[in-house]
Amino acid sequence: MKRCMALTGVVIRELYRRKDFYVLFVLTALITLLLASIQFFEDLRMVRYLREVTLLLIWISALVIAVVTAARQIPAERESRTIFPLLAKPVSRGEVVMGKFLGVWLATGLALAVFYGFYLLVGTFQGAPSSWLLGFQAFWLHWMMLAVVVSMAILGSLLFSAPSVNSTLCFIVVTGILLLAGHLNIIAGSMPGLWGALLYGLYFALPHLELFDVRDLLIHEHPPVAWGAFAVAGLYAAVYTTLFLIAAWWLFRKKPLST
Amino acid sequence: MWGVEPILRIEHLRVEYPPNRRGELPKVAVKDLSLRVYPGEVFGFLGPNGAGKTTTMNVLLGFVHPTGGEAFLFGVNVKEPIARQRIGYLPEMTYYYRFLTAEEILRFYARLFGLSSVEADRRIQRLLKLVELDHACRRPLKHYSKGMQQRVGLAQALINDPDLLILDEPTSGLDPLGRMKVREIIQRLKNEGKTVFFSSHELGEVETVCDRVAIVHQGELKVEGRVEELVRSHQANLEQVFLRIIGYPTSLAA
Ligand SMILES: Nc1ncnc2c1ncn2[C@@H]1O[C@H](COP(=O)(O)OP(=O)(O)O)[C@@H](O)[C@H]1O
Ligand SMILES: [Mg+2]
């Protein structure tokens, strides 16, 4: 565990010293502030529209940060050949996968906490406060969803050698799931025979990331999510994350690393 | 020597790389290589480029899995990560984390060995002095010259105070002064009783520091022995022995 944390520390340090990540982070934070500070609060519809845009921006930005950094980790170690002195230490490849995952996930969690913090703070100052409890739940669920995404991108980085290919595929898969996965069963029902069965299979096998999206509840000021459902969602994310990480470790374990 | 447990043992090692294209035969990089290195020795692993030196070392470090045969460090099969607890390794060419300072890199590696932070700090200060980087230790590595990066490499290889050092061409790409420094460090490690296993294709520097050498060519072990004995039995200096073994007409080389 100590070794995993050492690896995690390096991932986080790299992220805050890299400028591209910073640019995205600062930009999102600024736009969040800007959008939220416009005075339209007489009109409820306008308020909701602005909230929707802000949250969408946070979702896109967090997804980009998570996928791009996760997809880069192991390929960058191989390209810069830092993987050699690293694995020459008494650290197992499983620990490397775990350390990288934790580093990226914690870093995106920090970014996410800042985004949601801004969102809630500005709302409060503007006299249209959202529920802080629901805000926290939205942040937490979003972060759990990103655990699945980060582990998926790390698995992808061991399947596809080019990080850009992997990132693109991850974006497509994640947005595909977010937009479509909830409706797959209905589509499957309308299709006869083999295709319908296949789609049903997909519906049950896919991680339903859209379940972690409670933006509508935030926008329309619903009461907080029931804690039972909240806990189940966390568990659900943990199961998929674990599966992806085990698969990543399995692939990495046997991979020859020659020059 | 005999009766002492070898610190490094390679048994009938064979390594094949899968072919690049279908239909081609796999590339055999190492063939039936057996080798023993004993505690306290400085062992030179020599051979021309492409002889299989790096591949052999990559097996010892668990980067590449043998097609056949086995290798042990301290009697532990190299498949186990714990076999690497007491070794230090300097890769052939490596770039370290560019965004970290020398101090941060060494601290990171120290944590991988489970050193306490007090102990780590003590060693880091000593090593930075040894490789003469104490003045630059707070700058990120991207501002370092090649020679400086190589010295960071040496320092990281020594962070766990290893009993066995595996150095892959530690002097390649360095200027004469840099080479001399590296040789000095190897000599000092030897005086401290460490075992050093290093590869090289430059013979001049080997004679002065090595106790024993092995010469490999096209993946096969050609000769192995004490430097004086090789020189005596072949009636030639090490460079001529080397060139003869790799099939280069020595009359031209002389
Ligand atoms: N990843 C690889 N795939 C295919 N062949 C390789 C690979 N790495 C090395 N080789 C081949 O194996 C042989 C030994 O290489 P290497 O161990 O790097 O030699 P050395 O370190 O002695 O210069 C060379 O012929 C080289 O071309
Ligand atoms: Mg080599």
Image: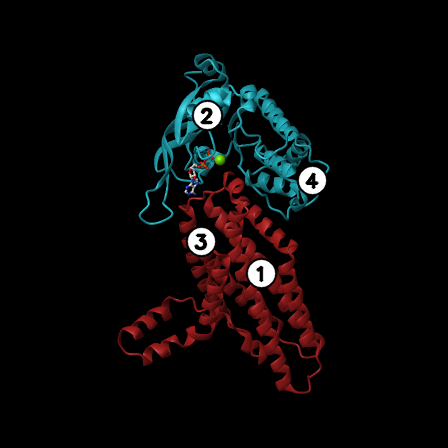
Chain colours: A red, B cyan
The residue singled out by tag 2 in the image is B7
* Residue type (three-letter) at the residue carrying disc 2: Ile
Front position among marks 4 and 1: 4
Q: Looking at the image, how many numbered discs can be counted on the residues?
A: 4
Give the residue number, with chain letter if any, for mark 4: B137
Cβ–Cβ under 8 Å for marks 3 and 2: no
Residue A108 — which label? 1
- Mark 1 near mark 2, Cβ–Cβ under 8 Å? no
Same chain for the residues under marks 2 and 4 in the image: yes
| Secondary-structure class at tag 2 | loop
Asked if the residue at tag 1 contacts the one at tag 4, i.e. Cβ–Cβ closer than 8 Å, the answer is: no
Q: Residues within 10 Å of mark 2 (few under 14, many from 20)?
A: some
Classify the position of the N terminus of chain B by image quarter: top left
> Is disc 3 on the same chain as disc 4?
no
Residue A158, numbered label: 3
Q: Considering only order in the chain, which callout, 3 or 1, is on the residue closer to the N terminus?
A: 1
**Horizontal and vertical percent for residue A166?**
47, 60
- Using the image, name the chain to which the residue with label 2 belongs: B
Find the distance from the CA under tag 2 to the CA under tag 4: 33 Å
What's the residue type where badge 1 is placed? Answer: Thr
Alpha-carbon span between mark 1 and mark 3: 21 Å
- Calculate the distance from the C-alpha at mark 4 to the C-alpha at mark 3: 34 Å
Please determine whether, in this image, residue A247 is positioned above or below residue B141: below
Q: Is residue A102 visible to the viewer in this orientation of the structure?
A: yes
Residue A3, picture quadrant: top right
The subunit letter for the residue under badge 4 reads B
Asked whether disc 1 touches disc 3, contact meaning CB atoms under 8 Å apart, the reply is no
State whether residue B150 is above or below residue A115: above
- Closer mark to the observer between disc 3 and disc 2: 3
Residue A94: % across, % down: 46, 47
